[in-house]
Image (spheres, rainbow, N blue to C red):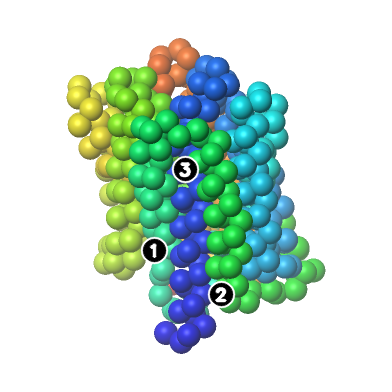
Amino acid sequence: MSSGPRRATVATFACFGASGFAFASWFARLPQIRDQLQLSPAGLGLLLLVGSAGAVLALVLSGPVVARFGSRSVVTVSAVLFAAGLATMAIGALAGLAPAVVGLFVLGLSTGAWDVAMNLQGTVLERRLDRPIMSRLHAGFSVGSVAGALAGAPLVALQVPFAVHLTAVAVLVAVGVPASARGFLPDIHGSATAARTGFAAWREPRTLLIGLFVLAFTLAEGAGNDWIVIAAVDGHHSSAALGTLAFAAFLAAMTIGRWYGPWLLHRYGRAATLRALALAGLAGTALFVFAPTLPLAVAGTALWGLGAALGFPVGMSAAAEDPAAAAGRVSVVASIGYCAFLAGPPLLGLLGDRVTVLRALTAVAVLFGCAVLLAGAALRPPPGVE
Protein backbone atom coordinates (compact mmCIF):
# COMPACT_ATOMS: atom_id res chain seq x y z
CA MET A 1 0.00 0.00 0.00
CA SER A 2 1.48 3.34 -1.01
CA SER A 3 1.65 6.23 1.42
CA GLY A 4 -1.37 7.98 -0.16
CA PRO A 5 -3.90 5.14 0.25
CA ARG A 6 -2.39 4.19 3.62
CA ARG A 7 -2.75 7.72 4.96
CA ALA A 8 -6.26 7.97 3.52
CA THR A 9 -7.28 4.66 5.10
CA VAL A 10 -6.11 5.79 8.53
CA ALA A 11 -7.79 9.18 8.06
CA THR A 12 -11.10 7.62 6.98
CA PHE A 13 -11.01 5.10 9.83
CA ALA A 14 -10.42 7.99 12.26
CA CYS A 15 -13.39 9.94 10.88
CA PHE A 16 -15.65 6.90 11.22
CA GLY A 17 -14.34 6.41 14.76
CA ALA A 18 -14.97 10.02 15.74
CA SER A 19 -18.55 9.78 14.45
CA GLY A 20 -19.14 6.63 16.50
CA PHE A 21 -17.60 8.14 19.64
CA ALA A 22 -19.77 11.25 19.39
CA PHE A 23 -22.97 9.30 18.82
CA ALA A 24 -22.37 6.79 21.60
CA SER A 25 -21.59 9.63 23.99
CA TRP A 26 -24.91 11.27 23.12
CA PHE A 27 -26.93 8.05 23.35
CA ALA A 28 -25.27 7.10 26.65
CA ARG A 29 -26.67 10.31 28.18
CA LEU A 30 -30.13 9.87 26.66
CA PRO A 31 -31.83 8.77 29.93
CA GLN A 32 -30.55 11.89 31.72
CA ILE A 33 -31.61 14.17 28.85
CA ARG A 34 -35.04 12.47 28.83
CA ASP A 35 -35.39 13.06 32.56
CA GLN A 36 -34.22 16.68 32.28
CA LEU A 37 -36.85 17.38 29.61
CA GLN A 38 -39.49 15.18 31.36
CA LEU A 39 -40.32 13.23 28.21
CA SER A 40 -42.49 10.12 27.84
CA PRO A 41 -41.30 7.31 25.49
CA ALA A 42 -43.44 8.82 22.73
CA GLY A 43 -42.07 12.30 23.46
CA LEU A 44 -38.51 11.02 23.38
CA GLY A 45 -39.22 9.29 20.08
CA LEU A 46 -40.51 12.55 18.60
CA LEU A 47 -37.43 14.40 19.86
CA LEU A 48 -35.19 11.85 18.15
CA LEU A 49 -37.32 12.28 15.03
CA VAL A 50 -36.10 15.90 14.77
CA GLY A 51 -32.49 14.80 14.40
CA SER A 52 -33.47 12.07 11.96
CA ALA A 53 -35.42 14.55 9.83
CA GLY A 54 -32.34 16.75 9.55
CA ALA A 55 -30.20 13.75 8.58
CA VAL A 56 -32.62 12.55 5.89
CA LEU A 57 -32.90 16.06 4.41
CA ALA A 58 -29.11 16.26 4.12
CA LEU A 59 -28.85 12.75 2.68
CA VAL A 60 -31.32 13.45 -0.11
CA LEU A 61 -29.28 16.47 -1.24
CA SER A 62 -25.78 15.26 -0.43
CA GLY A 63 -24.97 13.10 -3.48
CA PRO A 64 -24.49 15.99 -5.93
CA VAL A 65 -22.98 18.18 -3.19
CA VAL A 66 -20.35 15.62 -2.20
CA ALA A 67 -19.55 14.85 -5.84
CA ARG A 68 -19.17 18.58 -6.54
CA PHE A 69 -17.02 19.60 -3.56
CA GLY A 70 -15.36 16.32 -2.59
CA SER A 71 -15.61 14.18 0.51
CA ARG A 72 -12.77 16.00 2.28
CA SER A 73 -14.49 19.40 2.25
CA VAL A 74 -17.92 18.02 3.12
CA VAL A 75 -16.62 15.99 6.08
CA THR A 76 -14.70 19.00 7.39
CA VAL A 77 -17.67 21.38 7.28
CA SER A 78 -20.10 18.74 8.53
CA ALA A 79 -17.97 17.89 11.57
CA VAL A 80 -17.85 21.52 12.67
CA LEU A 81 -21.63 21.83 12.27
CA PHE A 82 -22.12 18.55 14.13
CA ALA A 83 -20.08 19.86 17.05
CA ALA A 84 -22.12 23.07 17.13
CA GLY A 85 -25.37 21.09 17.08
CA LEU A 86 -24.25 18.70 19.82
CA ALA A 87 -23.16 21.52 22.13
CA THR A 88 -26.35 23.49 21.45
CA MET A 89 -28.51 20.44 22.14
CA ALA A 90 -26.68 19.53 25.36
CA ILE A 91 -26.56 23.02 26.86
CA GLY A 92 -29.96 23.94 25.47
CA ALA A 93 -31.63 20.96 27.16
CA LEU A 94 -30.90 22.63 30.49
CA ALA A 95 -33.07 25.57 29.43
CA GLY A 96 -35.93 23.67 27.82
CA LEU A 97 -37.17 21.68 24.85
CA ALA A 98 -36.92 24.36 22.11
CA PRO A 99 -33.12 24.88 22.12
CA ALA A 100 -32.61 21.11 22.39
CA VAL A 101 -34.75 20.65 19.27
CA VAL A 102 -32.76 23.27 17.32
CA GLY A 103 -29.44 21.71 18.31
CA LEU A 104 -30.62 18.22 17.46
CA PHE A 105 -31.82 19.30 14.01
CA VAL A 106 -28.40 20.84 13.23
CA LEU A 107 -26.73 17.70 14.55
CA GLY A 108 -28.86 15.52 12.27
CA LEU A 109 -28.37 17.75 9.24
CA SER A 110 -24.59 17.62 9.56
CA THR A 111 -24.64 13.88 10.24
CA GLY A 112 -26.29 13.09 6.91
CA ALA A 113 -23.68 14.91 4.82
CA TRP A 114 -20.80 13.62 6.97
CA ASP A 115 -22.03 10.03 6.57
CA VAL A 116 -22.37 10.09 2.78
CA ALA A 117 -19.01 11.83 2.35
CA MET A 118 -16.97 9.42 4.47
CA ASN A 119 -18.74 6.40 2.94
CA LEU A 120 -17.91 7.72 -0.52
CA GLN A 121 -14.28 8.07 0.54
CA GLY A 122 -14.47 4.44 1.65
CA THR A 123 -15.57 3.35 -1.82
CA VAL A 124 -12.71 5.38 -3.35
CA LEU A 125 -10.31 3.45 -1.11
CA GLU A 126 -11.87 0.10 -2.02
CA ARG A 127 -11.33 0.83 -5.71
CA ARG A 128 -7.76 2.06 -5.15
CA LEU A 129 -6.84 -0.95 -2.98
CA ASP A 130 -8.88 -3.45 -5.05
CA ARG A 131 -10.23 -5.22 -1.97
CA PRO A 132 -13.23 -4.84 0.38
CA ILE A 133 -12.47 -2.68 3.40
CA MET A 134 -15.81 -0.92 3.93
CA SER A 135 -16.90 -3.08 6.85
CA ARG A 136 -13.57 -2.39 8.61
CA LEU A 137 -14.07 1.32 8.15
CA HIS A 138 -17.49 0.88 9.74
CA ALA A 139 -15.72 -1.08 12.45
CA GLY A 140 -13.98 2.22 13.13
CA PHE A 141 -17.41 3.70 13.83
CA SER A 142 -18.10 0.80 16.17
CA VAL A 143 -14.72 1.12 17.91
CA GLY A 144 -15.51 4.75 18.51
CA SER A 145 -18.98 3.80 19.71
CA VAL A 146 -17.62 1.30 22.22
CA ALA A 147 -15.13 3.90 23.46
CA GLY A 148 -17.89 6.48 23.78
CA ALA A 149 -20.18 4.08 25.67
CA LEU A 150 -17.40 2.91 28.01
CA ALA A 151 -16.36 6.50 28.65
CA GLY A 152 -19.97 7.44 29.29
CA ALA A 153 -20.67 4.71 31.86
CA PRO A 154 -18.34 6.06 34.61
CA LEU A 155 -19.38 9.64 33.85
CA VAL A 156 -23.01 8.62 34.38
CA ALA A 157 -22.08 6.78 37.59
CA LEU A 158 -20.13 9.84 38.83
CA GLN A 159 -23.08 12.09 37.93
CA VAL A 160 -21.00 14.35 35.68
CA PRO A 161 -23.50 16.77 34.08
CA PHE A 162 -24.40 15.70 30.55
CA ALA A 163 -23.91 19.25 29.27
CA VAL A 164 -20.26 19.22 30.40
CA HIS A 165 -19.67 15.74 28.95
CA LEU A 166 -21.23 16.39 25.54
CA THR A 167 -19.72 19.84 25.10
CA ALA A 168 -16.26 18.33 25.64
CA VAL A 169 -17.07 15.72 22.98
CA ALA A 170 -18.16 18.50 20.61
CA VAL A 171 -14.80 20.25 20.99
CA LEU A 172 -12.93 17.01 20.22
CA VAL A 173 -15.00 16.48 17.05
CA ALA A 174 -14.56 20.07 15.82
CA VAL A 175 -10.78 19.84 16.18
CA GLY A 176 -10.00 16.21 15.38
CA VAL A 177 -12.15 15.39 12.36
CA PRO A 178 -11.07 18.27 10.07
CA ALA A 179 -7.44 17.41 10.87
CA SER A 180 -8.02 13.76 9.90
CA ALA A 181 -9.94 14.60 6.71
CA ARG A 182 -6.85 16.30 5.27
CA GLY A 183 -5.57 12.80 4.52
CA PHE A 184 -8.46 11.87 2.17
CA LEU A 185 -7.93 10.95 -1.49
CA PRO A 186 -9.50 13.27 -4.12
CA ASP A 187 -12.86 12.19 -5.53
CA ILE A 188 -14.38 15.16 -7.46
CA HIS A 189 -16.03 14.18 -10.78
CA GLY A 190 -17.53 17.46 -12.04
CA SER A 191 -20.61 19.29 -10.87
CA ALA A 192 -23.03 18.96 -13.80
CA THR A 193 -22.51 15.24 -14.35
CA ALA A 194 -22.59 14.59 -10.61
CA ALA A 195 -25.90 16.38 -10.20
CA ARG A 196 -27.55 14.48 -13.05
CA THR A 197 -26.18 11.14 -11.83
CA GLY A 198 -27.21 11.83 -8.24
CA PHE A 199 -30.88 12.53 -8.95
CA ALA A 200 -31.20 9.89 -11.70
CA ALA A 201 -30.22 7.18 -9.20
CA TRP A 202 -33.65 7.55 -7.57
CA ARG A 203 -35.17 5.88 -10.66
CA GLU A 204 -32.97 2.76 -10.61
CA PRO A 205 -34.78 -0.40 -9.34
CA ARG A 206 -31.63 -2.15 -8.08
CA THR A 207 -30.47 0.95 -6.19
CA LEU A 208 -33.88 1.25 -4.53
CA LEU A 209 -33.84 -2.45 -3.63
CA ILE A 210 -30.42 -2.09 -2.01
CA GLY A 211 -31.86 0.87 -0.13
CA LEU A 212 -34.74 -1.25 1.25
CA PHE A 213 -32.27 -3.92 2.31
CA VAL A 214 -30.15 -1.33 4.10
CA LEU A 215 -33.31 0.14 5.64
CA ALA A 216 -34.11 -3.15 7.40
CA PHE A 217 -30.61 -3.41 8.87
CA THR A 218 -30.46 0.26 9.77
CA LEU A 219 -33.78 0.08 11.60
CA ALA A 220 -32.39 -2.84 13.62
CA GLU A 221 -29.14 -1.00 14.32
CA GLY A 222 -30.86 2.29 15.10
CA ALA A 223 -33.31 0.63 17.48
CA GLY A 224 -30.34 -0.73 19.41
CA ASN A 225 -28.68 2.68 19.54
CA ASP A 226 -31.86 4.49 20.59
CA TRP A 227 -33.53 2.07 22.98
CA ILE A 228 -31.18 -0.52 24.54
CA VAL A 229 -30.23 1.71 27.46
CA ILE A 230 -33.84 2.79 28.04
CA ALA A 231 -35.16 -0.78 27.73
CA ALA A 232 -32.51 -2.16 30.08
CA VAL A 233 -33.24 0.50 32.71
CA ASP A 234 -37.05 0.47 32.44
CA GLY A 235 -37.70 -3.12 31.33
CA HIS A 236 -34.94 -5.13 33.03
CA HIS A 237 -34.73 -2.72 36.01
CA SER A 238 -30.98 -2.24 35.73
CA SER A 239 -29.08 0.81 36.92
CA ALA A 240 -28.24 3.49 34.35
CA ALA A 241 -24.58 2.47 34.43
CA LEU A 242 -25.41 -1.22 33.79
CA GLY A 243 -27.79 -0.20 31.02
CA THR A 244 -24.92 1.66 29.38
CA LEU A 245 -22.75 -1.47 29.64
CA ALA A 246 -25.49 -3.48 27.88
CA PHE A 247 -25.29 -0.91 25.10
CA ALA A 248 -21.50 -1.33 25.07
CA ALA A 249 -21.94 -5.11 24.59
CA PHE A 250 -24.16 -4.43 21.57
CA LEU A 251 -21.54 -2.08 20.10
CA ALA A 252 -18.62 -4.40 20.86
CA ALA A 253 -20.29 -7.29 19.03
CA MET A 254 -21.01 -5.03 16.08
CA THR A 255 -17.35 -4.00 16.04
CA ILE A 256 -16.18 -7.62 15.95
CA GLY A 257 -18.60 -8.45 13.15
CA ARG A 258 -17.41 -5.51 11.09
CA TRP A 259 -13.72 -6.17 11.65
CA TYR A 260 -13.98 -9.79 10.51
CA GLY A 261 -16.55 -8.94 7.85
CA PRO A 262 -14.12 -8.90 4.88
CA TRP A 263 -13.02 -12.47 5.69
CA LEU A 264 -16.62 -13.69 6.01
CA LEU A 265 -17.68 -11.94 2.80
CA HIS A 266 -14.73 -13.36 0.87
CA ARG A 267 -15.31 -16.90 2.14
CA TYR A 268 -19.10 -17.16 2.02
CA GLY A 269 -20.28 -14.34 -0.24
CA ARG A 270 -22.48 -11.35 0.48
CA ALA A 271 -25.92 -12.94 0.51
CA ALA A 272 -25.09 -16.02 2.61
CA THR A 273 -23.13 -13.98 5.16
CA LEU A 274 -25.88 -11.38 5.54
CA ARG A 275 -28.60 -14.02 5.89
CA ALA A 276 -26.71 -15.84 8.66
CA LEU A 277 -26.02 -12.62 10.55
CA ALA A 278 -29.63 -11.48 10.21
CA LEU A 279 -30.80 -14.77 11.75
CA ALA A 280 -28.33 -14.27 14.63
CA GLY A 281 -29.74 -10.77 15.12
CA LEU A 282 -33.29 -12.10 15.17
CA ALA A 283 -32.38 -14.60 17.91
CA GLY A 284 -30.46 -11.98 19.89
CA THR A 285 -33.27 -9.45 19.83
CA ALA A 286 -35.75 -12.05 21.08
CA LEU A 287 -33.34 -13.05 23.84
CA PHE A 288 -32.90 -9.44 24.97
CA VAL A 289 -36.65 -8.85 25.11
CA PHE A 290 -37.66 -12.07 26.88
CA ALA A 291 -34.57 -12.89 28.99
CA PRO A 292 -35.43 -13.55 32.66
CA THR A 293 -32.09 -12.16 33.89
CA LEU A 294 -29.92 -9.18 32.97
CA PRO A 295 -26.83 -11.27 32.01
CA LEU A 296 -28.93 -13.18 29.45
CA ALA A 297 -30.33 -9.89 28.17
CA VAL A 298 -26.79 -8.58 27.71
CA ALA A 299 -25.93 -11.74 25.75
CA GLY A 300 -28.93 -10.97 23.58
CA THR A 301 -27.63 -7.47 22.84
CA ALA A 302 -24.33 -9.01 21.72
CA LEU A 303 -26.09 -11.29 19.20
CA TRP A 304 -28.23 -8.35 18.13
CA GLY A 305 -25.14 -6.23 17.46
CA LEU A 306 -23.45 -9.04 15.55
CA GLY A 307 -26.54 -9.47 13.39
CA ALA A 308 -26.67 -5.78 12.49
CA ALA A 309 -22.94 -5.44 11.80
CA LEU A 310 -22.61 -5.71 8.02
CA GLY A 311 -25.91 -4.55 6.51
CA PHE A 312 -25.04 -0.87 6.07
CA PRO A 313 -21.39 -1.22 4.91
CA VAL A 314 -22.21 -4.01 2.45
CA GLY A 315 -25.09 -1.94 1.08
CA MET A 316 -22.73 1.01 0.55
CA SER A 317 -20.26 -1.19 -1.34
CA ALA A 318 -23.03 -2.69 -3.47
CA ALA A 319 -24.34 0.78 -4.37
CA ALA A 320 -20.87 2.03 -5.38
CA GLU A 321 -19.88 -0.77 -7.77
CA ASP A 322 -19.97 1.65 -10.74
CA PRO A 323 -17.47 4.44 -9.89
CA ALA A 324 -19.09 6.93 -12.27
CA ALA A 325 -22.44 6.71 -10.46
CA ALA A 326 -21.13 6.01 -6.95
CA ALA A 327 -21.86 9.39 -5.33
CA GLY A 328 -25.51 9.48 -6.40
CA ARG A 329 -26.23 5.84 -5.62
CA VAL A 330 -24.54 5.95 -2.21
CA SER A 331 -26.61 9.06 -1.43
CA VAL A 332 -29.86 7.31 -2.45
CA VAL A 333 -29.13 4.14 -0.47
CA ALA A 334 -28.04 6.14 2.58
CA SER A 335 -31.17 8.30 2.29
CA ILE A 336 -33.46 5.27 2.29
CA GLY A 337 -31.47 3.66 5.08
CA TYR A 338 -31.68 6.76 7.21
CA CYS A 339 -35.45 6.68 6.95
CA ALA A 340 -34.97 4.11 9.70
CA PHE A 341 -33.85 6.92 11.98
CA LEU A 342 -36.78 9.04 10.80
CA ALA A 343 -39.51 6.44 11.32
CA GLY A 344 -37.98 4.16 13.94
CA PRO A 345 -37.80 6.37 17.06
CA PRO A 346 -41.38 7.71 16.98
CA LEU A 347 -42.93 4.37 15.98
CA LEU A 348 -41.09 2.42 18.67
CA GLY A 349 -41.81 5.19 21.16
CA LEU A 350 -45.54 5.09 20.40
CA LEU A 351 -45.53 1.29 20.57
CA GLY A 352 -43.56 1.51 23.81
CA ASP A 353 -46.29 3.68 25.34
CA ARG A 354 -48.72 0.80 24.76
CA VAL A 355 -46.67 -2.34 25.47
CA THR A 356 -43.49 -0.99 27.18
CA VAL A 357 -40.29 -0.12 25.33
CA LEU A 358 -38.81 -3.56 26.01
CA ARG A 359 -41.71 -5.45 24.40
CA ALA A 360 -41.82 -2.96 21.51
CA LEU A 361 -38.36 -4.15 20.49
CA THR A 362 -39.83 -7.44 19.26
CA ALA A 363 -40.43 -5.44 16.07
CA VAL A 364 -36.67 -5.56 15.49
CA ALA A 365 -36.85 -9.35 15.08
CA VAL A 366 -39.33 -8.82 12.24
CA LEU A 367 -36.89 -6.42 10.58
CA PHE A 368 -34.13 -9.00 10.69
CA GLY A 369 -36.53 -11.47 9.06
CA CYS A 370 -37.17 -8.98 6.25
CA ALA A 371 -33.41 -8.58 5.77
CA VAL A 372 -33.08 -12.36 5.28
CA LEU A 373 -35.66 -12.23 2.47
CA LEU A 374 -34.13 -9.19 0.74
CA ALA A 375 -30.46 -10.20 0.87
CA GLY A 376 -30.25 -12.25 -2.31
CA ALA A 377 -32.02 -9.88 -4.70
CA ALA A 378 -30.52 -6.68 -3.28
CA LEU A 379 -26.91 -7.85 -3.40
CA ARG A 380 -26.94 -9.49 -6.84
CA PRO A 381 -24.27 -7.71 -8.93
CA PRO A 382 -25.44 -5.67 -11.92
CA PRO A 383 -24.59 -7.00 -15.41
CA GLY A 384 -20.86 -6.90 -16.10
CA VAL A 385 -19.88 -6.54 -12.41
CA GLU A 386 -18.63 -9.53 -10.44
Task: In this rendered view, identify the residue nearer to me: 322 or 232.
Answer: 232
1 vs 3, front mark = 3
- Is residue 132 shown above or below 350? below
Q: Residue furthest bottom?
A: 2
| Residue located beneath label 2 in the image | 183
Q: Earlier in the sequence, mark 2 or mark 1?
A: 1
User: Which kind of residue does numbered mark 2 sit on?
Assistant: Gly
Which of disc 2 and disc 3 is earlier in sequence?
3
Circle 2 — which element? Answer: loop
Read off the residue under disc 3. Answer: 25
CA gap between label 1 and label 3 equals 21 Å
Q: Are marks 3 and 2 in contact (CB under 8 Å)?
A: no
Which residue is at 30% across, 24% downward?
238
Q: Are marks 2 and 1 in contact (CB under 8 Å)?
A: no
Q: Which residue is mark 1?
A: 136
Q: Secondary structure at mark 3?
A: helix
Vertical relation: 349 (above or below) 88: above
